[in-house]
Structure formats: C-alpha cells, structure tokens
Amino acid sequence: MSAHTIISGSTGSGKSVLINNFLYYLIRDVEDWKYELWIIDPKRVDYMDYRPFCKEYAKTIPDGENLLKKAVKRMFDRYDRMEREGWKEWPGSHIYILADEFGQILRSSAAVASLDELLRLGRAARVHVIAANQNAARTNGCPSHLRVNFTCQIGLHCVDKIASRQAIGCAGCESLPLFGYCYVFTPQDLKPELWKITMIEETEIKRMLKERARK
Ligand SMILES: Nc1ncnc2c1ncn2[C@@H]1O[C@H](COP(=O)(O)OP(=O)(O)OP(=O)(O)O)[C@@H](O)[C@H]1O
Ligand SMILES: [Mg+2]
C-alpha cells in the first residue's frame, strides 16, 4: 500500500473488519523492519490486540494530536536525510498511520493541520495515512482539502447515492450488501473495482499475533 487511503461506509458496514484484515496480512507476511505501525483507536477495543506491534498508539484526541505531530516531525527528518543523500524516495521502512473513527480526530484543528502536512507530503517519505470514517464528507466528515489527497478511496455499504459519491466519487456503494463487499477506487482505475471482504476470525488473529510475538 503506497497511497493514502480513506475508507468510508455506514455503521456496521465492516470498516474495522477491513482494517483488521490489512493488519493481519501486514504483520503475518511482511518483515518487521519494513514497516512501522502507528494506530489511533478512539474506540479503544478494535485494535487492542495489535498494541504490542505498534510503534505509537493513541486512544484519546490529545494523544492522537501528539501522534500526528510526531509523524510530521519524522516525515521532515526523513526529508532532511533524503536531501543530504540525494534520495528522491525514502529507502527504508513505511510508516502506516491508521486512524479509525476519523471524524473524532478531525474535531481537533491541530490534528487537521498535521494531517494536511502528512497527506500532502507523506508519500515520498513513505508515511501513509489510512483513515476510516462513517461519513466521507458530511458533518463530522473529512474536509475537501484533506480529502483530495487520499488517492485510494474505499467505499463499503453507504446509506444513499450521495454518501457513495462522497466515498468513492460515484454512486454504487448504496447497492452493496450491508457488509462483505466494497468498491476500491485509485487514480489508475477508470472505474471502481469490486472487492469481496472475508472476515478473519478473532481466534485466528490472536493465534497469528501470538506466533509472531514469539519470533
Ligand atoms: N466481511 C465481513 N464478513 C462477515 N461479517 C462481517 C464482515 N464485515 C463486517 N461484518 C460484521 O459486521 C460487524 C461490524 O463490522 P465493523 O465493526 O467492521 O463495522 P464498522 O463499519 O467499523 O462500524 P462502525 O462505524 O460502527 O465502527 C462485525 O462485527 C461483523 O459481525
Ligand atoms: Mg469501526
């Protein structure tokens, strides 16, 4: 995953299940040194099993603000080094910043300012934001100046066509089943691609994490 990603869908449509899938395969299949995991988890329970694998973890808005500020600093430290070394892209680890319940963190103007920097400048420094929110752009949603820099848009079931357009730029998500499917749209695509989402059982996630922790 090299773009910034926004995941939108109505409540219960499977946004957290999708992020859990991403985390499962990342931790299971990718070598530790290739990535850092930074998680903002306002609900506190969705990602608690992953805490030992996180470089940074935040559950309150002030902690989330601090996490994002630290990410901006890390990003500019990387650019300093890239400038000195003549690198166009950071050659080391990817930093994945996962922000579920994105609307919560968007209530903080300090967080929005940090996100703006990360979304505009993060890609070449390998700092990626993955955000999930019930509503793509309405009240409690994502301001359009942030939204344009999420180059990968994922829409799960949406309440209506308007919400679907805000999620992926066109209608379609309103016709998806309540969970289990999503549309994925990236700038390379001419039209959104339909994906099936298989939920990974919690026992399997716990088993895999236990095994990875032993290594
Ligand atoms: N792909 C799937 N396969 C089977 N069940 C699913 C799937 N996706 C979601 N569910 C069911 O729906 C429930 C809600 O999913 P999830 O918590 O991911 O929704 P959400 O979009 O994050 O909701 P919220 O906005 O309230 O946080 C899951 O606990 C599970 O029971
Ligand atoms: Mg959720």
Image: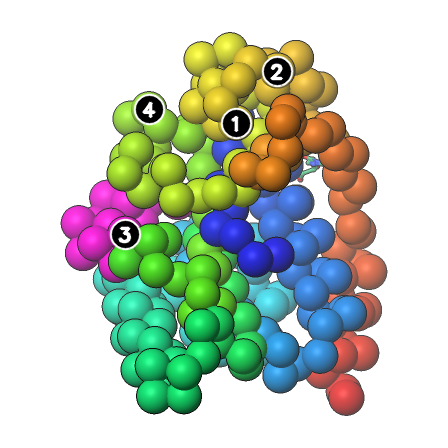
Q: Are marks 3 and 1 in contact (CB under 8 Å)?
A: no
- Disc with the residue nearer the chain's start (3 vs 4): 3
- In the rendered image, is residue 38 in sight? no
Q: Residue at x 52, y 52 (%)?
A: 3
Q: Are marks 3 and 4 in contact (CB under 8 Å)?
A: no
Q: Residue at x 55, y 14 (%)?
A: 171
Quadrant occupied by the C terminus = bottom right
In the rendered structure, does residue 114 fall within the stretch colored magenta?
yes
Marks 3 and 1 sit apart, C-alpha to C-alpha, by 20 Å
Q: Which residue is disc 2 drawn over?
A: 172
Which amino acid is tagged 1? Ile
Magenta range is 102-116
Residue depth check, mark 3 versus mark 4: number of the one nearer the observer: 3
Q: Quadrant of residue 166?
A: top left
Q: Point out which mark residue 116 bears.
A: 3
Q: Is residue 143 left or right of residue 175?
A: left
Asked if the residue at label 3 sits under 8 Å from ligand 2, the reply is: no
Marks 3 and 4 sit apart, C-alpha to C-alpha, by 18 Å
Q: Which residue is disc 1 drawn over?
A: 168
